Image: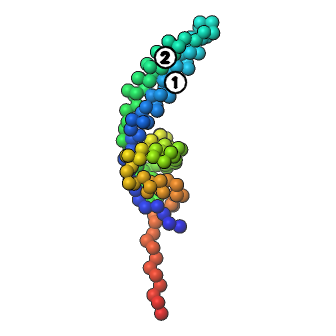
Amino acid sequence: MRHPPPVAVTCSGGAPWRACQALLAALAAAALAAWAHGWLADGYPSAFFSLAAALAAGAFAWRLAVPRAVDLRWDGSSWSADGAGCRAEIVIDLGRWMLLRLDAPRRWLALDAREAGGRLHLLRAALYSPAATTPPSPPAAPAPLP
């Protein structure tokens, strides 16, 4: 079995990942505010309170979701993130954007094609290949002809 070649990528997800996190927080806050106001106001939720809660939660989440660059490496036999060993799994693959789940410690990592550049294909090959248990060995030399 051939092993994928070593590859290293520095990724943070950038603004799209940050916007996605802020949007999820805003939607959750809007739903909670609509439910709470509807429950307190005899079943009539207020769009104003929902919008205010969404804007506040979205702005707060945007400030908290500062992108932090992570150095993800495949050395031919194992994964590492910022020098610590881990296991990487693809959760979502949209072609130009991927969401990875890393364990040890468990965290999510968004990867944009602009960050990976030309290494995206190598990274995808390493992620989709079964992990090797031993480092790849060099190809065997051909037997001499008689």
Q: Which residue is mark 1?
A: 27
Neighbour tally class for label 2: few under 14, some 14-19, many 20 plus, Cα within 10 Å: some
Q: In terms of depth relative to the viewer, which is nearer, 27 or 126? A: 27
Residue type pointed to by label 1: Leu
Q: Answer left or right for 100 relative to 83.
A: right
Instruction: Name which residue type carries label 2.
Output: Leu
Secondary structure beneath label 2: helix
- Residue that carries the numbered disc 2 in the rendered image: 51
Taking the spot 48% from the left edge, 93% from the top edge, the residue there is 146
Q: Residue at x 45, y 69 (%)?
A: 137
Which x, y percent locates residue 49? 50, 12
**Mark-to-mark CA distance, 1 and 2:** 9 Å
Image coordinates of residue 50 in percent, x first then y, are 51, 16
**How are the residues colored?**
rainbow
User: At 48% from the left edge and 57% from the top edge, which residue is drawn?
Assistant: 125
Q: Compare residues 73 and 121 and report the one nearer the observer.
A: 121
Is residue 104 in view?
no
Rendering quarter of residue 13:
top left
Answer above or below: position of 115 versus 40. below
Q: Can the viewer see residue 108 in this picture?
A: yes
